[in-house]
Amino acid sequence: MPDIIQLLPDHVANQIAAGEVVQRPASVVKELLENAIDAQATKINLVVKDAGKTLVQVTDNGIGMSPTDARLSFERHATSKIKTAEDLFNLHTKGFRGEALASIAAIAHVELKSRTAATEVGTRICIEGSKVVSQEAEVVAKGTTISVKNLFYNIPARRNFLKSNPVETRHIIDEFHRVALAHPQVAFTMTHNGSDVFNLPESNIRQRIVNIFGNKTNEKLVPVSEETEIVKVSGFVLKPEYARKSRGEQFFFVNDRFIKSPYLHHAVSSAFEGLVKEGTHPGYFLFLEVEPTSIDINIHPTKTEIKFDDEHAIYAMLRATVKHSLGQFSIAPVLDFNKDAGFETPYEYSKKSPVAPTIEVDRNFNPFKSGGGSKGGAYTGYKEKSAGWESLYVGLKDDFEAVPSTEAASQIEFESEEVTGRMFEAGETETAQISFQLQNKYIISPIKSGMMVIHQHLAHQRVLYEEFLRNITVKEAVSQQLLFPLEIALTKPDLEILRKVKEQLEHTGFLFEDFSEEKISISGIPVGLNNSNAGAVLEQLITDIRDDVPDAGFSLNDLLAKSMARAMAIKSGTSLNKEEREHLVNRLFACKEPTVSPDNTPVLITLDVTELEKRFM
Ligand code: ADP
Ligand code: MG
């Protein structure tokens, strides 16, 4: 019998390999985007036609390729990213198998244009079904553009196997999200059939999430952060009330690579146990950083599954960290599962000018006289305005009543109750009696479970933000007339930006006399502003609008309110007297969401007595 084994020709081998790497247009998107990241691009553009079936094109401004490298890049196992087997265990790049371009070129019409910084002229190569059709020098931009046309043109079975355009587009967008989320410091755009789908400026991770998933997402994020010897975790989980029936936004990244891990997913889900409804899935964007040597990415051709050395430890740590973040967050007394934290519902119309909430305290109540005073006398003033908040304070009274009056005196000196006890006896408002200011920056106040630290600048931002938002929505604000109109010179683009929000600005109290080519003239400003800072507030606003990409009218209002609140809030370093502190704290707790600033940073933290006790051990 003659020998029958023969080596497969390269193009056949490549086609077979392609089956593993390239399942659909989205796979091409992933490989090309990752190559651009590995090439240190800071700007990456993705162009897609017909759900990627006709064209997937990625342009980057990365390091580019020399003519020789450009040609070699299409060879199988051709990679610049590893040299030895050991390198496999210490990976810092997305790619390393040297298979993607070879695979793609085996099953599509591919055009590559590339140039490095070292040369004036670049290279253009066309390949069809692994055959180089042309290679020539061409003047091209620095970086690389790879266009993949007519995917699976030579494998009709696979081409027919592709799903409908909406489904394939969905897959492409998923891949785009994964890479874009892992690299917020890189600017991305995506267009599909000529229209813009995403335009993501370089930003931080929080902004990137918001830019991708919409402005409302910002309010839903709970920060997660922890570092141990084996892993560093950062990112966000979505508040439990936003858990969804369908698997929604669930992202794990390990060393900036998107991965799928049912095991780690379980860790996060179990941290949400009891907080989300049965059958709903919490959302998360979690970034794990580990030693590259402690993971194996090599177990799947698409590299979305990896193996950790310390899987169990990471599981436990992740679960605890997410739990902790949720716990910290749930100090939020307004954690009301039915409440929509979004901004669809405009603020209720209220004719009356805002009134600071008052607190009624039973002046006759003395916690140290058992049975003394009437129950429930305190805090009724809060109830209407900020349901739930008072729970932080309310139990105090019961605690005291539980202490027999004879023993009380001897315990007072050693227990924190003493301070809070006074607060009841003295009457007035509790914050007035017991708050003080630290470093002209924080307001400190005891609460039932320990103490509360309020960041004055952020607290004021929250207050102003809700006020502005209300004014803009209700279209009714108080304006202070200026004796002499204030003139501000602006560039044309800035003026255009301002023109877009003119109406909303008027609802906050601005009055414009003139809105001409290169200047504006202001005859009235919102209460709280003055001549000297009005200009700065507007400038801040213009910058904020320019940097953001407001999509709907409502998020523009949101942005406006945020920007003005930020510019006008009392700064850290401002000394506040007792009345001012009291006023601010009361206004804060009359807010819908007193615990976070408009940008979603915590406004206050609480320190548990138990935590304090631990520190004295
Ligand atoms: P891998 O990424 O696993 O190395 P690929 O087939 O994806 O394999 O790419 C092969 C090689 O081509 C890469 O190692 C890299 O040197 C080069 N390359 C691919 N895409 C780019 C790009 N956008 N910019 C610069 N070089 C690139
Ligand atoms: Mg690659």
Image (cartoon, helix red, strand yellow):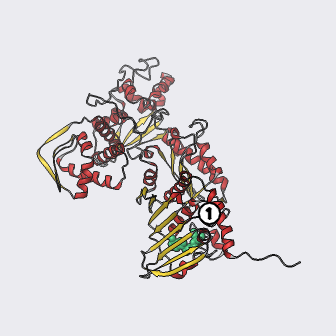
**Image quadrant for the N terminus?**
bottom right
Q: Is residue 277 left or right of residue 405?
A: right
Instruction: Determine whether 606 is above or below 170 in the image.
Output: above
Neighbour class for label 1 at 10 Å: few (<14), some, many (≥20)? many
Please state the horizontal and vertical placement of residue 289, each as a whole percent of the image.
56, 59
Point out residue 86 in the picture as x, y percentages from the top left corner. Answer: 66, 73
- Please tell me whether mark 1 sits on a helix, a strand or a loop: loop
Name the residue nearer the viewer: 429 or 417. Answer: 429
Residue displayed at 25% across by 50% down: 498
Residue under label 1, please give it: 22
> Which image quarter: residue 509?
top left
Task: Examine the rendering and report whether any part of residue 312 can be seen.
Answer: yes
Residue 152 at x, y = what percent?
Answer: 61, 64
| 209 with respect to 347 (left or right) | right
Residue placed most toward the observer, 545 or 616: 545
Compared to residue 76, the image places residue 497 above or below, namely: above
